[in-house]
Image (cartoon, rainbow, N blue to C red):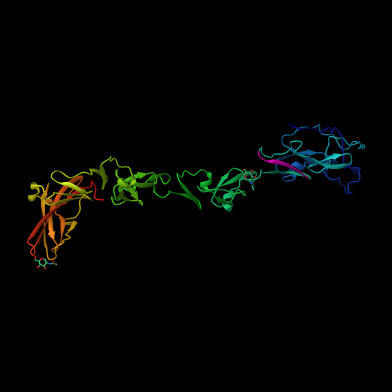
């Protein structure tokens, strides 16, 4: 907006009335009022052009306009229509009422009635503030104020680098007119927008698969027992405990998520966590033996043997004893009695291994008993070690792996020198070798 000031001052001397002396009184002292000077030639008081005589009559952006008896400072943008100069001041100076358009007030003021009031340069757009600056009217003048975050250098507004003042705990980011604080990863801005506080990532959905532990600025993932932390630091991978050691289980290790367990082969049950123990099917009643059969528990299973095991010419005299009656002629060259015994051993025993001791109960004092293996499927696998006159040990000579069954006739020959009597009896031993070493 352009303000137009129209100065209608035609032939009017507004303020100082010019007092001029008559030219006749030459030697008299002549003085003009302020703003005028005595022109000797014309013998008149003449207006002083202050715009030319006063250096920097107007400050800043203001332009000087000479005026009768004084001058005006107006914004450059103001257009001024000047009236013609009065031809002479010698004309009778008739006091005339002041014209409103003429401003007799100091710069920054305007006349209102008889007094001067402040001009609101901001309101009237008579300022030269930059668009970014705020015009603030003051008494007699105005100032241009920079927005927050800017400081005024000359007439320019320059951004203040707040980051130089260490406002932020971690990182400061200066932006035009302001600044913001940022925090390192793992922290977040506190309520004061300057400090950084630890983020509890565990409560913010940290990607730990199992356990999460918050720590200052970060977090840690941990795994439950039986799991290993993956290379990514988040995932938990099951540990295959079975692959670490073959001694974890007596028979077989089964890996499970986070743990392992031991299993036992059929016919065995787990005792504790790793050991297998044979199930005695004959006692638990799970055997399949029928009428007329005897259940014999062996490693990993059971056997059903006929209770009537005596073969002609032997006759049964008790559950496991057969005798050959002397009245039968065939019995003369046969052992008098056959006693059935059953035993079970595990596979892969260290050898030689004592497995069965046989003991004679001789009715004749001083009798001498000799022992031998009378028959057997694999005679090489066993031998007899005589202990004394009445007992001997059956020794396993070779490592055997089951399942396997031996039937060994251990013959005991008793000789009584006193009565010149010799008798022979057989212990028919069934040796079952289980399928496992336990
Ligand atoms: C922090 O910044 C937010 C968003 O900019 C604002 O709403 C809040 O008032 C600020 N708090 C303080 C204390 O400055
Ligand atoms: C064993 O037999 C021998 C000879 O037959 C005899 O001399 C010895 O006394 C017997 N020993 C025992 C402990 O019976």
Query: What residue do we see at 49% from left, 44% from top?
Result: 206
On whether residue 137 falls in the magenta region, the answer is yes
> Does residue 224 appear in this view?
yes
Q: State which quarter of the image contains the N terminus.
A: top right
| Of the pair 236 and 406, the residue shown nearer to us | 406
Q: Main secondary structure of the magenta part?
A: strand
**Where is 80 relative to 319, above or below?**
above
User: Would you identify the image quadrant in which residue 121 lies?
Assistant: top right
Vertical order, 211 against 370 (above or below): above
The span picked out in magenta is 132-138
Q: How many marks?
A: 0
Towards the viewer: 423 or 187:
423
**Residue 377 percent across, percent down from the top left:** 12, 46
**Residue in the foreground of this view, choosing between 165 and 358:** 358
The residue at 58%/46% (across/down) is: 180
Q: Is residue 266 magenta?
A: no
In the shown orientation, is residue 385 left or right of residue 282? left
Q: Quadrant of ligand 2?
A: bottom left
Quadrant in the rendering for residue 286: top left
In front of the other: 216 or 122 = 216
Can you give x and y, in whole percent of width and height, for residue 330 in the image? 8, 46
Q: Please tell me in which quadrant of the rendered image residue 110 appears.
A: top right
Residue 153 visible in the shown view? no
Residue at the image point whose x is 31% and y is 50% from the top: 277
Residue 50, given in percent of the width and then of the height, sits at 77, 43
Residue 46 lies, in percent from the top left, at: 83, 40
């Amino acid at each position: 907006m352009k303000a137009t000031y129209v100065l209608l001052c035609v032939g009017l001397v507004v303020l100082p009335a010019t007092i001029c002396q008559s030219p006749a009184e030459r030697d008299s002292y002549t003085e003009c009022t302020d703003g005028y000077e005595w022109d000797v030639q014309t013998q008149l008081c003449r207006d002083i052009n202050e715009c030319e005589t006063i250096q920097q009559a107007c400050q800043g952006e203001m332009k000087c306009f000479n005026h009768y008896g004084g001058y005006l400072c107006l914004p450059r943008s103001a257009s001024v229509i000047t009236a013609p100069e009065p031809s002479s001041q010698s004309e009778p100076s008739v006091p005339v009422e002041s014209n409103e358009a003429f401003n007799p007030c100091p710069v920054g003021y305007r006349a209102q009635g008889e007094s001067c009031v402040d001009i609101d340069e901001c309101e009237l757009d008579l300022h030269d503030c930059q668009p970014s600056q705020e015009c603030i009217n003051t008494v007699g003048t105005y100032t241009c104020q920079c927005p927050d975050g800017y400081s005024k250098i000359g007439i320019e507004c320059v951004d203040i680098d707040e980051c130089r003042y260490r406002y932020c705990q971690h990182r400061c980011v200066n932006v035009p007119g302001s600044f913001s604080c940022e925090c390192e990863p793992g922290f977040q801005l506190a309520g004061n927008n300057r400090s950084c506080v630890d983020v509890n990532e565990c409560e913010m959905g940290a990607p730990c698969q199992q356990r999460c532990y918050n720590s200052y600025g970060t977090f840690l993932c941990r795994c439950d027992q039986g799991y290993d932390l993956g290379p990514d630091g988040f995932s938990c991978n099951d540990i295959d405990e079975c692959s670490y050691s073959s001694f974890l289980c007596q028979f077989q290790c089964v890996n499970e998520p986070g743990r392992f367990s031991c299993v036992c082969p059929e016919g065995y049950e787990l005792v504790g966590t790793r050991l297998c123990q044979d199930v005695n099917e004959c006692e638990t009643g799970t055997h399949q033996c029928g009428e007329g059969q005897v259940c014999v528990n062996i490693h990993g299973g059971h056997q059903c043997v006929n209770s009537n095991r005596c073969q002609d010419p032997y006759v049964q005299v008790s559950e496991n004893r057969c005798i050959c009656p002397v009245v039968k002629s065939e019995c003369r060259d046969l052992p008098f009695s056959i006693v059935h015994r059953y035993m079970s051993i595990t596979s892969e025993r260290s050898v030689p291994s004592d497995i069965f001791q046989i003991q004679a109960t001789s009715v004749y004092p001083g009798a001498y008993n000799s022992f031998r293996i009378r028959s057997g499927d694999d005679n090489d696998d066993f031998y007899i070690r005589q202990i004394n006159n009445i007992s001997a040990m059956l020794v396993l000579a070779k490592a055997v792996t089951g399942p396997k069954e031996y039937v060994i006739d251990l013959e005991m020959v008793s000789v009584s020198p006193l009565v010149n009597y010799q008798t022979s009896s057989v212990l028919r031993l069934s040796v079952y070798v289980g399928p496992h070493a336990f």
